[in-house]
Amino acid sequence: MKKIHLLLAAIFTCSMAFAQQPVYKNPSYSSQERINDLLARMTIEEKVGQLNQVNGGVLTGPSVANDPGAQGKVQLLKEGMVGSFLNVVGTEQTLATQKIAVEQTRLGIPLLFAFDVIHGYKTVFPIPLAEAASWDLEAAERATAIAAKEASAAGLHWTFAPMMDVSREPRWGRVMEGSGEDPYLQAKFAEARVKGFQGNLDENHVLATVKHFAAYGAAEAGKEYNTVDLSRYALWNYYLPPYKAAVEAGVATVMNSFNIMDGVPSSGSDFLVNQVLRDKWGFNGLVVSDWASFGEMINHGYSKDAKEAAIQSIMAGSDMDMESGVMRTTLAESVKNGEVPMAVLDEAVKRVLSLKFQLGLFDDPYKYHDAAKERRTLLAAEHLAEARKSAAASMTLLKNDQGLLPLQNPKSILVLGHLAESQEDVLDFWKGQGDHANTVTILEGLKAKYPASDITFIQAVNRDGIFDQNAVKQINKAAKKAEVVIATIGLFGDLAGEARSLGDISPSDGQMTMLHAAKATGKPVVVLVQAGRPMVLTEVVRDFGTILYTWIGGTQHGHGVADVLSGDVNPSAKTAMSFPAAVGQIPVYYNHYNTGRPHQDGNEGPAHFWVSRYRDIPNEPLFPFGYGLSYSTYEYSDLKLSKKSINQNESVTVTVNIKNTSQVDGTEIVQLYIRDLVAQPIRPVKELKDFTRVDIPAGQSRTVSFELPATKLSFYDENGNTLLQKGAFKVFVGKNSDDVLEADLELK
Ligand code: NOJ
């Protein structure tokens, strides 16, 4: 009885305590009631403060003209003029900063801490483009869940990922961040990564951001921040689907892109944000600018000054100003004089506050700042194990002509090239908090894999791609005792990422000299190519028979490489971007239109003159989208459709037989494409519509079946309306976008 009394007394005291609190601090009210209460207490300046996101750490963009400096930022924070920080990381720093917001501001509104956790926080996974080559959605979800776990343990609430910019531009440094050239594959990865990052949004997950909205990957000539000039038809069909998939998967926030669309910077685009994102797709979450992109509308020549830029951004439906300060310095005035309705400001502020309530920050603002949890979570053994699996699963075997791979217990190996010993280059610009010191190099991976082998390393070519002439002699000498040479070429890690466009994406002359020196020894050569984008490898492919594309594998890169070289992991990855045969082909991509004068490489003579082709280089890429080999070999046969024709409400079952004709168990990525033969507007020569990963033991066959609903035959018109047109289609199933079986289907 006494106990019950005590309990009641405790409940009573507790509710008395809440009763004395303002509604917004009282958890017994709904979030909506709490947000309304808080809004009613806020000054216009405090409201604008919530829309202000400030950099508090390393610069991930240019410093801005009106930057208040470190002291100025603390002052702004105390005045309630900061809603969120980016680039403040780690429990210690985030806790100290959060304490100022909660304990030293008038209303005690907690901050959101955001950071670019692109492919891992401390445990760095392969770059997203490499991960996409695995076509393994579950693995991508696991990887992002681990990234979220580490990031949230380090005080973060919010990541600026996944990046879902379809791109056909290997010259663009940021292709590494996305999932390649295909809208369907990219959309599938969007869903998986949003799920992985956000989970149920508890304190082991983070808010995700789909970016960059929209079509940032279409920058002209692959030049960073360049003009995008697209038809609406291309926008709807090629570029928007992945962002839409992320919205449907419940992504919490969306980031504007730097580029223009129809001559309007995305940050101020009523069409993109209000009409497409909010009205058509029903997205009611937060839209954050990209770094200073509100203010950059002045450079674009779209806004005459900061005041106009802030008005144009918020009126277009964008909410939070990352780093440009145009909202902080001008928006309160524009609201007071009626140029921006209070209701518009309130809506934007509500979106920020509702995320903070959703994360429970008003009830426990310090729940992400547990130093002991941070210590035990970062680089946990199970995270490293998953990163290793993921690295191996992304390595793409481009050639294995003589079956040189796998290398089972070679007695002696000669390893060449700076990249083999580099801890730095297995990480890219977007490495999160990844430390070079924690990475495994190729050399270390090989030594761990082959403890009994005699492994000699000669750098031969340095980080800048310069060949050391003295190395020829050393290579010749060392090769005498070597059973095999492993030569590493590619681009250094930091060349993958933002502001890293390149006009030349082929190996350096020094690397080519090294490769030829290796070849001249007469020993078998395995070429490892490490880069965050497809490179132009025409000469390498012509002269070498064994090529493994390792991408940039992250913390466990070296182990991943060794797992594949040894055959402990049978490679199965297939590239999510076409590999150009020459820079002059770019953009080269599989889902192009047919043109009025199509051309097939190899067709020569007068009948093939007035056709869509180059006179000096092929039309076809060096390796098509979806291409990759395995130590297993597969034979596809018996492509069958359950029906020859379907109506708009039906689906057809597509089956194919795949035989593993090798002695090795393998996993094959099976791809289904369609072609709409006659349509208004026209459709591409192929479109990916489904895929699956199937394990096939050596010598065995599997029947793979896909359900293809008529809805997958649809596409968008230039206004984003769905069209489903009757008529003849082709259905293709195969190993890659080029090597397929085909069947006919009619839509009635
Ligand atoms: C600019 C990049 O475009 C964006 O992706 C990133 O999230 C922000 N900087 C913040 O670092």
Image (cartoon, rainbow, N blue to C red):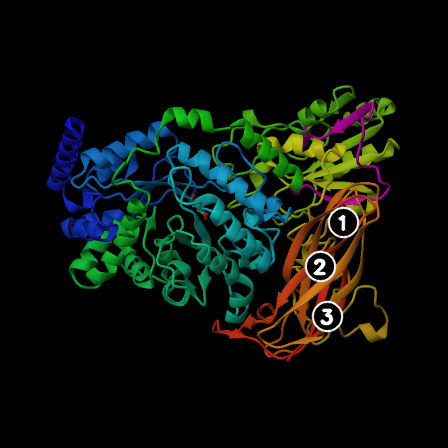
| Amino acid type, callout 2 | Ser
Please tell me whether mark 1 sits on a helix, a strand or a loop.
Answer: helix
Q: Quadrant of residue 547?
A: top right
Q: Is residue 543 visible?
A: yes
Q: CA distance from mark 2 to mark 3?
A: 20 Å
Q: CA distance from mark 1 to mark 2?
A: 19 Å
Q: Are marks 2 and 3 in contact (CB under 8 Å)?
A: no
Q: Is residue 117 left or right of residue 593?
A: left
Please tell me which residue lies in front, 581 or 546: 546
User: Residue 552 has which mark?
Assistant: none
User: Residue 612 has which mark?
Assistant: 3
Considering only order in the chain, which callout, 2 or 1, is on the residue closer to the N terminus? 1
- Dot 3 crowding, Cα within 10 Å, few <14, some 14–19, many 20+: some
- Dot 1 crowding, Cα within 10 Å, few <14, some 14–19, many 20+: some
Q: Quadrant of residue 413?
A: top right
Please tell me whether mark 3 sits on a helix, a strand or a loop.
Answer: loop
Q: Is residue 532 left or right of residue 146?
A: right
Please tell me whether mark 2 sits on a helix, a strand or a loop.
Answer: loop
Going 85% across and 68% down the picture, which residue do you hit? 604
Considering only order in the chain, which callout, 3 or 2, is on the residue closer to the N terminus? 3
Q: Which residue is mark 2?
A: 737
Q: Which residue is mark 1?
A: 538
Q: Which residues are magenta?
A: 394-420
Quarter of the picture holding the N terminus: top left
| Amino acid type, callout 3 | Ser
Going 73% across and 28% down the picture, which residue do you hit? 460
Residue 411 inside the magenta-drawn segment: yes
Please tell me which residue lies in front, 624 or 38: 38
| Amino acid type, callout 1 | Thr
